[in-house]
Amino acid sequence: MRFDVVTLFPDFFTSALASGLLGKALAKTIASVHLVNPRDFATDKHRRADDEPYGGGAGMVMKPEPIFAAVESVPVLPRREVIYLTPQGEPMRQKLFRELVRDFEQLVLLCGHYEGVDERVMNLVTREVSLGDFVLTGGEIPALALIDGVVRLLPGTLGNAESLICESFESDLLDYPHYTRPPVFRGWEVPPVLLSGHHGQIARWRREQQLLRTRQRRPDLLPEAERGSSGFGE
């Protein structure tokens, strides 16, 4: 998977892209991230990538020429999506990450700033994506979240592929509680079933916990018929 990130602040990504599982995946060339600064394509002596909005109003707007030139400077792979990170886009969900991994080999990520981008830039865009119903200073944090969410689904990123199956949102349920040593910490004990060695009982307990947590914390994820009951005879 190839990522081309159009950003005014490429240094923002430096540390994150070299850290943790994401850094290891990039080092193993499971994916690649290329940072493109639209300011490098500005034609005036001040390398301006923004200007005042027509019609007046607060703030500045990112100019179309540098963004078009930045996007047109990167290679075009056959299965490509150009994504604009904006609060107006579709919510960033696990289902979206799975779709991007399945359907595309190149993701071009446009990071907006100020009051956003000139509307004509939308002629480049094939999808708008939002990190949530709030406004940030720019699109870099959402872009990094999308890169991380997609890369971790690529084969070879996680040492144990089973981790992709038994976790929040992969089955439309939240994850079950996890415990490790010691068996007792400050009076809090690990549930006895996890120490039993009985795999069938452990699997049932984990499923029950997934349903319970989802019903308590995110009932919107459950089918309507299950929202009023735990799904395990409660």
Image (tube, helix red, strand yellow):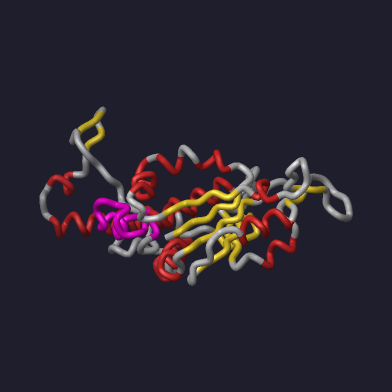
Magenta-drawn stretch contains 161: yes
State which quarter of the image contains the C terminus. Answer: bottom left
Up-down relation of residue 63 to residue 119 (above or below)? above
Q: Is residue 224 visible?
A: no
> Can the viewer see residue 125?
yes
Q: Is residue 23 left or right of residue 10?
A: left
Q: Position of residue 91 (x, y in %)?
A: 55, 59
| Residue 43 place in picture, x, y as percent | 75, 49
- Report the side of 146 relative to 189 (left or right): right
Residue 139 drawn at (x, y percent)? 60, 49
| Span of residues in magenta | 152-169
Residue nearer the viewer, 213 or 125:
125
Q: Reply above or below: 136 against 233.
A: above
Which picture quadrant has residue 136? top right
Our reading of the magenta stretch's main secondary structure is loop
Which residue appears farthest toward the top when viewing the image? 186
Q: Nearer the viewer, residue 45 or 11?
A: 45
Q: Quadrant of residue 99?
A: bottom left
